[in-house]
Structures are given as C-alpha cells and as structure tokens.
Amino acid sequence: MGAGLIIAIGAQNAFVLSQGVRRNYPLLIALICWWCDCVLILAGMAGMGKAVATHPQWMRLAAWGGAAFLLVYGFRSLQAALAGGRLETGGTPAVTARSAVLTTLAVTLLNPHVYLDTVVLLGSLSGQFPGTGRYAFATGAIMASFVWFLSLSLGARILAPLFRRPAAWRVLDSLVCLTMWSIAASLVFQNWFLDKIQMAS
C-alpha cells in the first residue's frame, strides 16, 4: 500500500527525477523526501489523521499554497524547456544545497496529496491492525518510501548519457512542467468545487 501511493506519478517524483538527472544533490533530496514521509506516516499512525480529517480548512489552505508554488515551478520548467540545455560532465550541482533543501521541502510539504496519502490514508489503515501490527505496517510503508526515493534519485544517473542531447532536456522539462501544472489545476478545481458546495449549502 505504501509503495503504491508513493510510486504514483506526481510533483514530488517528477522533481526528484529531474534533480537526479541533473546531479543536484540527489542523495540529499532523496533523504529529505524519505524523512518527510517518515514523520508524516508516524504522525498518521499516532492519530493525527483524524485531526486533519476533521479540519478540512487546513487542507484547503495547503492546497492553495501548493497550487501557487506548482504553477511557479512549472513556469520555470517551461522556461528551461524553451531554453534547452545539456548535461554538465563536471559533476558540480547547478544549485546550492540550501536551495535544494528548501525546494524539496516546498514540493513535498506544500502538496496536500502527501497528507492525504501518508497522514490520513496510511494512518487510518495502520489503526486497523491490533497490537504491534500497526507499527509493522508503518515500518513497511517507511521502508517502501526509502527504497523508492533512493532508487529514483540515484537511478536517474543511468539516464545521464541520454541527457547529453538538448532535445532530451526539452522533453524532461516539458513533462515536469505539465505534471506541475496539471496537479496545480486539480488543486484549484478541487478548492473551487468545495467553495461552490459550501455556498450552495
């Protein structure tokens, strides 16, 4: 269950893959994503999922902030796609470690889907197991997160030969842009739809 939720295509996975190909602190980014999952999965197991579910305004606030961030990041990816690029063989990251950390945290924590998947869904599922069963369930989900992000980030280096061509960068940045914008659009639509329902009631 944890692997199925984590591996689904989304803004976070697109970001991790693109940064792994660019060799922008791939291990650091993978560990940050995993650490965030650890904290959120354990929080859901501890009962925070119920608190989040009873306060939908928190999720809506996160959705608006996440949509704004994803729109901006998608625009930057579009600019990169139009400009083109090539893989630098020197191995020097194109961004600072601080920038990598902050952007990774933003992509992860400003996306309300991560709270639904980890805190609410996995948290509620872990509560169905008696005794120490919920700890085993949470451990399995945490290990699935670790294996996935490490494989995605470090495995992106295998694609390095492909990205010596500018056309490959244009395709990757275009896909990242479309992923970010589609998720931002879904967040905006969901909030708009909820506002309409609330006004009608």
Image (cartoon, helix red, strand yellow):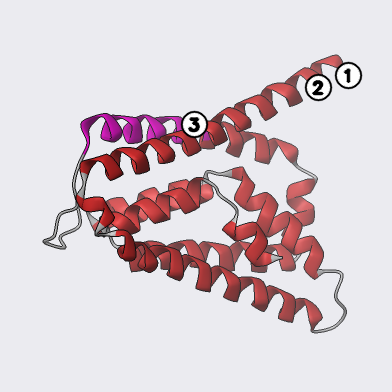
x and y, in percent, of residue 62 in the image: 59, 39
Q: Main secondary structure of the magenta part?
A: helix
Please say if 68 is above or below 7. above
Q: Which residues are magenta?
A: 67-84
Residue 201: which disc?
1
Kindly check if marks 2 and 1 are in contact, taking CB atoms under 8 A apart as contact. Answer: yes
Q: Is 82 colored magenta in this rendering?
A: yes
Q: Is residue 198 left or right of residue 34?
A: right
In this figure, which residue is indicated by the disc labeled 3? 181
**Residue 108 in the image, given as x and y percentages of width and height:** 50, 51
From the viewer's side, name the closer residue of 84 and 196.
84
Instruction: Determine the residue positioned at 78% across, 47% down.
Output: 53
Find numbered disc 1 in the image and state the secondary structure of the residue it sits on.
loop
The N terminus sits in image quarter: bottom right
The reply to whether discs 2 and 3 touch (Cβ–Cβ < 8 Å) is no
Marked residue nearer the N-terminal end (1 or 3)? 3
Residue ID for mark 2: 198
**The disc labelled 2 sits on which kind of residue?**
Gln
Cα–Cα span, label 2 and label 1: 5 Å
Badge 3 local density, few (<14 within 10 Å), some, or many (20+)? many
Label 2 crowd bin: few (<14), some (14–19), many (20+), radius 10 Å? few
Please tell me whether residue 158 is drawn above or below residue 181 in the rendered image. Answer: below
Say which of marks 2 and 3 sits in front: 3
Mark 1 Cα shell of 10 Å, populated few (<14), some (14-19), many (≥20): few
